[in-house]
Image (spheres, coloured by chain):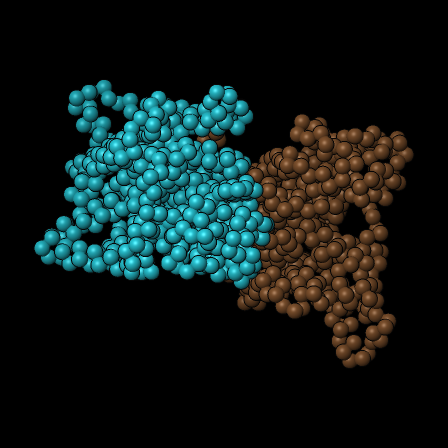
Amino acid sequence: MAALGVATSGGNWFSALALGVTLLKCLLIPTYHSTDFEVHRNWLAITHSLPVSQWYYEETSEWTLDYPPFFAWFEYALSHVAKYFDQEMLNVQNLNYASSKTLLFQRFSVIFTDILFVYAVHECCKCVDGKKSGKELTEKPKFILSVLLLWNFGLLIVDHIHFQYNGFLMGLMLLSIARLFQKRHMEGALLFAVLLHFKHIYLYVAPAYGIYLLRSYCFTANKPDGSVRWNSFSFFRLISLGLIVFLVSALSLGPFLALSQLPQVFSRLFPFKRGLCHAYWAPNFWALYNALDKVLSVIGLKLKLLDPNKIPKASMTSGLVQQFEHTVLPSVTPLATLICTLVAILPSIFCLWFKPQGPKGFLRCLILCALSSFMFGWHVHEKAILLAILPMSLLSVGKAGDASIFLILTTTGHYSLFPLLFTAPELPIKILLMLLFTIYSISSLKTLFRKEKPLFNWMETFYLLGLGPLEVVCEFVFPFTSWKLKYSFLPLLLTSAYCAVGITYAWFKLYVSVLTDPPVSKTKKQ
Amino acid sequence: MEKWYLMTTVVLIGLTVRWTVSLNSYSGAGKPPMFGDYEAQRHWQEITFNLPIKQWYFNSSDNNLLYWGLDYPPLTAYHSLLCAYVAKVINPDWIALHTSHGYESQAHKLFMRATVLIADLLIYIPAVVLYCCCLKEMSTKKKVANALCILLYPGLILIDYGHFQYNSVSLGFALWGILGVSYHWDLLGSLAFCLAINYKQMELYHSLPFFCFLLGKCFKKGLKGKGLVLLIKLACTVVASFVLCWLPFVTEKEQALQVLRRLFPVDRGLFEDKVANIWCSLSVFLKIKNILPHHTQIKISFCFTLLSLLPACIKLILQPSPKGFRYTLVTCALSFFLFSFQVHEKSILLVSLPVCLVLNEIPFMSTWFLLVSTFSMLPLLLKDDLLMPTVVTVMAFFIACATCFSIFGKTSEEELQLKSFSISVRKYLPCFTFLPRVIQRLFLMSVITMVLLTLMTVTLDPPQKFPDLFSVLVCFVSCLKFLFFLVYFNIIIMWDSKSRRNQKKTD
């Protein structure tokens, strides 16, 4: 306690912010937790009580281990602390075990590992230039950035209510980004390689890392017009990068290669059996596509253009089963989504290669990769939007245009997380926290860029304000109408379609800004 | 206000903390046959909804007064009635006569918690925000920081949202009253304070400073001219608001007397449970409760209370000022808490409210006091299974205060408001310069004892001979600190005007 006092007394706002949010996380311990809680408990049990050779074969619980090996080792390490809390949670047969001590341990493990995230945010704040800083602390970009990252609504509800370990994974990513900003490329590459073997969803942003390191690290010089100088290629740097990636992969996958289990591991990591959309539609392109299909089928039925007997039953009754069958529009295959994703990512990659703009350009490309794969990916979770929101926070305090895109993206992206929490006691929490974050982010960024043109035009303002009535209709009005039983999917459909519009818009706007940015002036500044 | 968004965020943080605390257990959860304060509030909804108003305070076959009989003033009863109407719409089982005793469900808990939050949001929080906005000679940032610290005060949050009570209503009305009389809205202020008293009779702890401050104002204006007019207006306001609140009960003498008997149960003991006041602490050495006859106890406690609050009150009448008013509120409430008859541990909140108001003037001492006040309720909070939220909110409050006011740098004589006191002591004792250092040491020791005692209470089993050992220790330690604070705040009041004169001289 006294140490806390010393830490905070010197006007050390950063530790106060970090401690404050940590305490808030502690208060969230008794809240609802989703099945992901059981998922991670099961992984604790698997890694603790079974030999490595069994990890990727065990299937007592339906929540089989489907993260890369480093995460499994992470759970293994945790389980050695867990046994001092409650031995019973480490039993594979103990399905859905959730004693109060288990709860306490699991929640605290998330809160504790978030220390890495806090450190990463601290490092990221160093990368922000303080030239534009106002006199007051609350108007400094560093302060705003640390609030935006530490108090991020999405992370709070996904990690500390819904239950996942995104905090320290995001911490790894932010740390590697910070290292690239600090010109410590090898460290950045190492951290990202490690991260990939913790959770393979970060593969989506791997192209940005690969191209950036190749273009701006392996090639040591540019021609005066900014294009690549081919003879400046450093083999040594390429080889050391390759070595890092190879060693990390060997460490992670080596044991399974030795056990000749690699195909099994990969089949667990990439389950293409699942549907196009997750149970709740993530607000991406496919949500719009599905919604359009639904609307067309309803219209078709009304106009008697479609035969009611030929329409698949599932799509009409709930619309939210995992395998969504399209009635009017052609069905989408995994390959098609893969191609769409690649096509969407390519321009940003080209930009990174032909218009290198230093770490900021890399960051933009990374966000575009994350967003594009979110837009077109197969079986995307709505939580994946955090992958774009958190790095985007770094950009938002730098330029008014980016701030505007960031605000649209975060507000809609965060709102789209609302269906994750559907229980009554958590309703006030999610609304209060959302208001807290949204009001703070919009107002503080507006204050930061008050000398430039307004952040939103009338259309964007109208769209963002529309989220309020949407929430009222979906959660307060709809449950009391007679449609509740007949069209129970309607609120979810409305939410994801509405948010999809905003996220598509933000993605599009960011793309335009990246493609049209003049390259030379930017490089000169840096 | 250009930084309105910061104030909004602060209010939202306060609300979030309140709601997350409310997810925890409440008093008497799953503990038949009597349950706890949660059941009391639910029971009052049941009584007020189902019985005619004349029977609310009377014992009958439908209204067993021994089972959480209504013992708060009419405004609480009306509030219960209002909540009952809402409950009726949602689920009539919650307030069904007789059959709903001990009703507990997740949905009902949610409803009850929501009623507290709404009352808080309507009454207490706006008052705090307005109070902070009205502070003079402060930057906007400081005002916002001040609001954050007041809204995060753990004692009130834990009792209202953990234990379950509606203190924010009575304290909120009292705060509106303080705001009113401090900013020359005397009539509205006294109206708000009457509402506070009529919501919870414990608000009488604050009544003497209100009375003295307003009387002092009248004297200042001259009792023959404007002062008399003001006095008459005030008297009319008070009488009218009381009559309005008591309208159904004043028509018959028996009704009014019965309500009064319920409100002031003098036949109960000197203190209940474990309270951090003088009588409870003394009973460790001397069982006053058993030695002295009942009416003597009442007389003794009355005399002590009166003696300890008299100096501050007289001073306030002679020199009425908003600042003196706030400090007198602190000392009076503290005197009542320490010395008066039949005190509950939760009554410390009545002292905490005015201390919150001086947080910006003496941040170090106020923070310390507010920490001690929360600590003094530890046995109660532990009984309600609220250890986790207690620890978390106390730490959050401490961090907020430490960051916003950087309290550890503010321990000079000037900042403790002890300058003039030290100067006058130094006339007789020239070496009297160690006070700030002593106070710092005391603070450190106090924090260490609080942490240690908390740890001991949580981890160790008390010896069989003394099952209440730890809770008695907690109360005893807190009581000693409260006595120290009583002396400190009295010193501030007594030496106040002198310091102002000195400042003027030096300026």
> What is the residue that sits farthest to the bottom in this orientation?
A303
Residue A280 percent location from the top left of the image: 71, 56
Q: Residue furthest left?
A: B224
Q: Identify which residue is drawn at 59% across, 50% down.
A: B106
Say which colour chain B has.
cyan
Q: Which one is nearer the viewer's eye here, B80 or A97?
A: B80
Of residues B197 and B289, which is closer to you in this image?
B289
What color does chain A have in the rendering? Answer: brown
Side (left or right) of A389 relative to A294: left
Q: Quadrant of the N terminus of chain B?
A: bottom left
In the figure, is residue B417 to the left or right of A496?
left
Q: Residue at x 35, y 38 (%)?
A: B268
Which residue does the image show at 31% across and 26% down from the upper left? Answer: B291
Q: Position of residue A278 (x, y in %)?
A: 75, 54
In the orientation shown, which residue stands out farthest toward the front? B61
Q: Nearer the viewer, residue A430 or A142?
A: A430
Q: Is residue B435 left or right of residue B26?
A: left
* Position in image of residue B362 (x %, y %): 32, 37
Residue B441, quarter of the rendered image: top left
Query: Visible in this render: residue A211?
Result: no
